[in-house]
Image: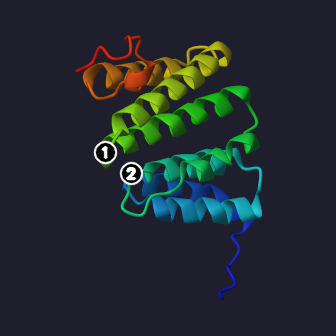
Amino acid sequence: MFELKSLTPEGVPAALEKAHRYRLLNEPEQAESICEDVLRVDPDNQAALTTLVLALADRFHDTRPASPASARKLLPRLRGEYERAYYAGIIAEREGVAWLRSNKPRGGEAAYDCFRRAMAHYETAERVRPPANDDPLLRWNSCARMIMSHPDVAPPRESVDEPAGMLE
């Protein structure tokens, strides 16, 4: 339909700065487009990959949501073990928040599952984090607080150890 125009390699830093700005302006689709343009010129650009993951995750609860699977597909392209674990946690956490905001039946159970997966990823990131980087701890605490402050964010009832027939 349309032939996309290519960025110049020299324009990549300014384009990435714009992508960050669009995320801050709550325009993740613009940030996504810019990151995709950067990745056409530099397929291994780590800043573009992480910004794209975050921009996609920004849209999980949108009226035209992005798929968590589309964000997860980018994780193997991240070079570091820390980055792969940390951003996997971000994806799972934001998916949990999207479930909370969805008001769908069993959304609290789905959110719980997402938050627990996020916490496991953050624990992995914590073990391999760079010195003085407490980001995975902050994110883990955020997930724990989401679970503790929302009574509906809980594991499915059938996983609770209660004898069958005791609930009336």
Amino acid carrying label 2: it is His
- Specify the farthest residue to the front: 165
Q: Which residue is mark 1?
A: 101
**Residue sitting at 54 percent across and 54 percent down?**
67
Q: Quadrant of residue 39?
A: bottom right
How packed mark 1 is, by other alpha carbons closer than 10 Å (few <14, some 14-19, many 20 or more), is: some
Q: Is residue 68 left or right of residue 47?
A: left
Q: Residue 163 versus residue 155: which sits nearer the camera?
A: 163
How packed mark 2 is, by other alpha carbons closer than 10 Å (few <14, some 14-19, many 20 or more), is: some
Q: Marks 2 and 1: CB-CB under 8 Å? A: yes
**Residue sitting at 65 percent across and 66 percent down?**
37
Helix, strand or loop under label 2: loop
Residue 21, label in figure: none
Which percent across, then down, holds residue 62?
A: 38, 57
State the scheme by which the image is colored: rainbow
State how many labels appear: 2
Which percent across, then down, holds residue 7?
A: 69, 70
Which percent across, then down, holds residue 21?
A: 44, 54
**Residue sitting at 59 percent across and 25 percent down?**
121
Q: Quadrant of residue 75?
A: top right
Q: Residue 151 versus residue 19: which sits nearer the camera?
A: 151
Residue 61, label in figure: 2
- Above or below residue 62? Residue 77 is above
Q: Is residue 168 left or right of residue 40?
A: left
